[in-house]
Structures are given as structure tokens and as C-alpha cells.
Image: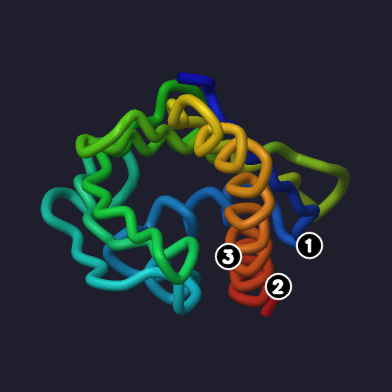
Amino acid sequence: MAQVEATTERIVAADADTVFDTLADYSGTRAKLLPEHYSEYEVREGGDGEGTLVHWKLQATSKRVRDCLLEVTEPTDGELVEKDRNSSMVTTWRVTPAGEGKSRVVVVTVWNGAGGIGGFFEKTFAPKGLARIYDTVLANLAAEVEK
């Protein structure tokens, strides 16, 4: 199995604390940031950053739906880590200052991909598809905090 990684980033015209708090608000704004690729969104525990348990289904392609149950931790300031109980998938959101009144948001998702030819295609195409989804999430985040 090869590790697959997808990374996306965006500069947002809002301070890092505001951006981080918006991302960490699973019981409020987070659901509004998600595009149509996400369904069955449900906060099962917590709802604000560390200690949150959130469920969703992520349809990355017409054939592939991931049923995700994510435990959220905050290992360092400005960092949210979502570990999927149902797979090897881990998504890390990092929010850092990027000049006055701006933030850099970087989202990195890693998982153990399939082996063989299927793994080759997964490693080649899945990161691009996931990056497109995260581009939309980050655009929605920017629209939310730049009001």
C-alpha cells in the first residue's frame, strides 16, 4: 500500500483566530462550508474543535463514497486534525498568520492507498479530485470570514 496525499492551500483575508474558530465550529459554520460532495453531516460529540466526533459521507467520485467518522484533536495552536475511525484517512488543517489581517490555510489529507494498478490510479487521480473539493471548501471559508 502506498500513502496517498492531497494538499490544498489558500490565503484568506481574515485574521488567523477568526479563520481557525470558523473551521473548528463543527456544530455551526463548518457544515455551511461543505460542498455537495458531503452528505449525512452529523456532530455526534462536542462540536467545537478538540473532542468533537463528526460524521459525514464524502463522495469524491461518482463511484466512491467514504463513510467517515472523524475524531478531532488540536495538537498545536492553529491546527485541527481529523482522524477517520473507519479508515486510515487523516486530514490536518493548519491556519497561520500571513500578514496583517490575512491567514494561510493549508489542508493536507493522507491515507493508505490500494496496491497494484488500482493503487497507481488512486495515487495519480485521487489527490487532484480531493484538491478540487477542498478548493471549494476553502472558497466557502473565505466567503464566510471575509464578510
Q: What residue do we see at 67% from left, 40% from top?
A: 124
On the rendered structure, is 68 left or right of 112?
Answer: left
State the mark number for residue 146. Answer: 2
Amino acid type, mark 3: Val
Closer to us: mark 1 or mark 3? 3
Mark sitting earlier along the chain (3/2):
3
Amino acid type, mark 1: Ala
Give residue 137's position: percent from left, percent from top.
58, 65
On the rendered structure, is 122 left or right of 139?
Answer: left
On the rendered structure, is 130 left or right of 13?
Answer: left
Amino acid type, mark 2: Glu
Which residue position holds label 1?
13
Which residue position holds label 3?
137
Q: Give the SS element for disc 3.
A: helix
What separation in Å lies between label 2 and label 1 (alpha carbons)? 6 Å
Q: Give the SS element for disc 2.
A: loop
Q: Nearer the viewer, residue 69 or 74?
A: 69
On the rendered structure, is 42 left or right of 117?
Answer: left
Q: Is residue 95 visible?
A: no
Q: What residue do we see at 49% from left, 59% from top?
A: 22
Dot 2 crowding, Cα within 10 Å, few <14, some 14–19, many 20+? some
Q: Nearer the viewer, residue 80 or 6?
A: 6
What separation in Å lies between label 3 and label 2 (alpha carbons)? 14 Å
Mark sitting earlier along the chain (1/3):
1
Q: Are marks 2 and 1 in contact (CB under 8 Å)?
A: yes
Q: Quadrant of residue 42?
A: bottom left
Quadrant including the N terminus: top left
Give residue 103's position: percent from left, percent from top.
74, 48
| Coloring basis for residues | rainbow
